[in-house]
Image (cartoon, helix red, strand yellow):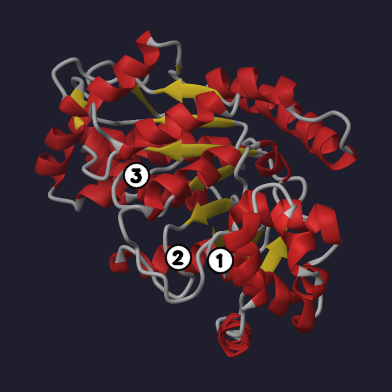
Amino acid sequence: MNQNDEKYWIALKSIDGVGNVGFKNLIDAFGNPGNVFNASFHALMVVPGIGRKTAGNIKDFTAWQKSEEELELIKKHGAHIITYQDPHYPKYLLNIYDYPVFLYVKGLLKEDDINIAVVGSRLASTYGKFSTERLCRELVLNGITVVSGLARGIDSAAHRGALAGGGRTIAVLGCGLDIVYPSENEKIYREIIAHGAVITEYPFGTPPNAPNFPARNRIISGISLGVVVVEANEKSGSLITARMAMEQGREVFAVPGSIDSAGSRGTHKLIKEGAKLIENVYDILDEILPQVDIGSKEHSSKAHIVKRNSREEKKTQEQPFIEKLTEIENSIVNVISSKAENVDGIISATGLKSQDVLNILLTLELRGIIKQLPGKMFIRKE
């Protein structure tokens, strides 16, 4: 699509009263946004969802300079837009009611991505962040693309785990692509663009206002085959994402936590309401992979590879192997060699940064050197 066509898409979307559903009805009636601006007032008015007022707004539109400026910003920031007619537009997103008519994208969306969303509390515990990083690393090692919202806490851990596993991850923003929110995630933001994509439906310059995030959440669940909630209190925004996923017919998974933790109340409530309790990555893969669209050659081929790799990876993980440990890895293993120890105890005993301990614990667990026990405890495998 050339820039002149993009100008009409951006302009039409900016008109008060059009919205995503009205936009699609206009395209169905007139073929493309350029034709919409050339249509008569009467022809516009009778389109479902438009009416007299919105038709008048379309005919009175004069803000072409603003649309041109938006195109310049897209170019300046190395971004592009993908409309719902583009083959690279996330195919599962088309199945929800109010899908965006186009997305702003930095990075690369792939047609064969098999997406799983992983979300949770911004005020995540050490256990929650560790569990999330481990789970997301295992997901990408099995060919899954991890989707999250770049927020503090669980979302950031989800992206970090995917990147640590060398896989793809997609961040869905509740603001314009030129705003990194929260600002401390700028490094992760850049890494996601290099190993996946950052996407939004909001124009450049849109601040991260509170009402944007529930709307953002429908995209997180909409582009995914399932949503995993790791930690959430009873009023968490992650529960909104889970509810939307249920309404969209997506699978909902929840990671159980301590009954004494406020961050477990939301996830435990989801489990009571029918979300699938997960203990490892295979609880997700076994549920999701049979649903991959077999009508798509790209998806069916990748699903076959993922299933094969999943079986092989499971066998490997069931047979622990020992490699030479680094000095730091040894210091952690020594803490838990005699008895089970929790994460906070390991951090205190080693004097290492919490994030370094989490990363090393994840690596040691994946290598089969240690294992995690209930209650956030870790022990050396015999």
Q: Is residue 77 left or right of residue 305?
A: left
* 98 vs 80, nearest the viewer: 98
Amino acid carrying label 1: it is Ile
The numbered mark at residue 189 is: 2
Q: Is residue 25 above or below residue 244?
A: below
Counting labels gives 3
Residue at the spot of label 3: 360
Q: Is residue 149 above or below residue 291?
A: below
Q: Residue at x 60, y 24 (%)?
A: 249
Badge 1 element = helix
Find the distance from the CA under tag 1 to the CA under tag 3: 25 Å
Q: Residue at x 29, y 34 (%)?
A: 128
Bin the neighbour count of mark 2 within 10 Å (Cα to Cα): few under 14, some 14-19, many 20 and up: many
Q: Identify the secondary structure beneath mark 3.
A: helix
Which badge, 1 or 3, is on the more N-terminal residue?
Answer: 1
The crowd level at tag 1 (other Cα within 10 Å; few <14, some 14-19, many 20+) is some
**Quick one: 102 or 117, which is closer to the camera?**
102
